[in-house]
Image: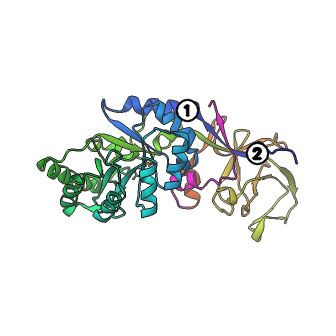
Amino acid sequence: MPEIKNSFRPAWIEINLTQLRKNFELITRNMPAGLKFISVIKDQAYGHGAIEVAKIALEFGATYLAVATIDEALELRKNFSTAPIMIFGERTEEELRLVLDYDFTCCINDIQKANMLANLVTDLNKRPTIHIKINTGMNRYGMRFENAIEVIEHISKMKQLNLEGVMSHFAMSDELDKSFALTQLERFQKVLDEMKHKNIKITYRHICNSGGFLDLPQTHFDMARIGILPLGIYPSKVCRRISGLQPIMSVKCKIAAICDLEIGDYVGYGMHYKAESPRRIAVLPIGYGDGYPRVRNKGSVLIHGQRAPIIGGNAMDATIVYITDILQTELWDEAILMGKQENEEIDVHEIAQLQNSVSYDILTGWSSRLPRVYKNK
Ligand SMILES: Cc1ncc(COP(=O)(O)O)c(C=O)c1O
């Protein structure tokens, strides 16, 4: 059998690395002097490719690359032997051994985990770097703010661990109502004040995600953790804009079949669309198995710069669109499911609305069977 090198599938994701560089440049220029950033590239940089995004993040001076699982961290380590890598979330004891072996920085959420990690340290010249997570209201990971100081003080004295940072995470930083974010800030600040009072010194204090970075400059502290923003996507409709920032991902395919419907014909599983007049339709070789929401007579794609509505229920591998009005359409013409064509654009937020979800869900939901094509590597 001949060697199979690339995907030849006529459905793919294009990632514009020139625009990614531009986005990082715009964001870093927008940062106040001295503010550092963590490039959050978990879940393959939200579906864009962790390695490709990491390379560019490091070019622009990322202090850390951050992921959520040990496997993601190991993949990064294989490609970046010396880059600082942080793992969010909670670790098992087995994972903590790998944290030590591969020099990852991990988040510590309680005293038990600090003890467990300290007990694994056999060489004080190889102390693991840790950031303590404070739960200021997200109620996911971290130690509660009211009684964190005693644990922080205890951990700061553990000679096996290198306490480098203290962090928290916003539950809502990108909406107009900032009241809870400000409550979280107050709680975080209280812990930091107590640390100062006890003369506990750390290098990095951080609480901001993209929303906090954009809208809450008073919460920047030493470092911002930004994931979605460099991808050219705003975390919400209402947060501050940075002029020139553009999405870097487009989802494309080629029309695999064109058919003519007669009056009374149905389209697709479940017979959700019935032609009331003669109509022309195009079949796209991409479906909900690729990560597009499962829809019925909802959503559209771009063909020749015009919107072609999706008709019927899309299938795992196929989506059918109405093209009667786009007369010039031919077999194997390009269709855009997400992205720009001529003067039209379908953005990730529009697709997210089809299933009452958010942009993060759509970005990470594009399946790995869609090949990623990197432009301008
Ligand atoms: C702990 C933590 N910090 C930062 C981020 C980055 O958030 P965003 O992509 O909104 O910048 C995330 C992402 O969910 C996160 O879990």
**Residue found at the far bottom of this picture:** 270
Q: Residue at x 18, y 48 (%)?
A: 200
Disc 1 residue crowd, few under 14, some 14–19, many 20+, Cα 10 Å: many
Residue 20 higher or lower than 321, as above or below: above
Q: Earlier in the sequence, mark 1 or mark 2?
A: 2
Q: Which mark is residue 7?
A: 2
Q: Residue 318, image x and y in percent?
A: 76, 57
Q: Residue 253, image x and y in percent?
A: 74, 46
Q: Are marks 1 and 2 in contact (CB under 8 Å)?
A: no
Q: Which mark is residue 280?
A: none
**Residue found at the far left of this picture:** 197
Q: Amino acid at mark 1?
A: Gln
Which one is nearer the viewer's eye here, 74 or 370?
A: 74
The reply to whether residue 172 is visible in this rendering is no
Q: Residue at x 78, y 47 (%)?
A: 9
Drawn side of residue 238 relative to residue 372, left or right: left
Segment colored magenta: 356-377
Q: Quadrant of residue 249?
A: top right
Q: CA distance from mark 1 to mark 2?
A: 24 Å
Drawn side of residue 264 relative to residue 35, left or right: right
Q: Residue 93, image x and y in percent?
A: 42, 63
Disc 2 residue crowd, few under 14, some 14–19, many 20+, Cα 10 Å: few
Q: Amino acid at mark 2?
A: Ser
The answer to whether residue 305 is magenta is no
SS type, badge 1: helix
Q: Quadrant of the C terminus?
A: top right
Which one is nearer the viewer's eye here, 232 or 299?
A: 232
- The residue labelled by disc 1 is 19
Which label lies toward us, 1 or 2? 2
SS type, badge 2: loop
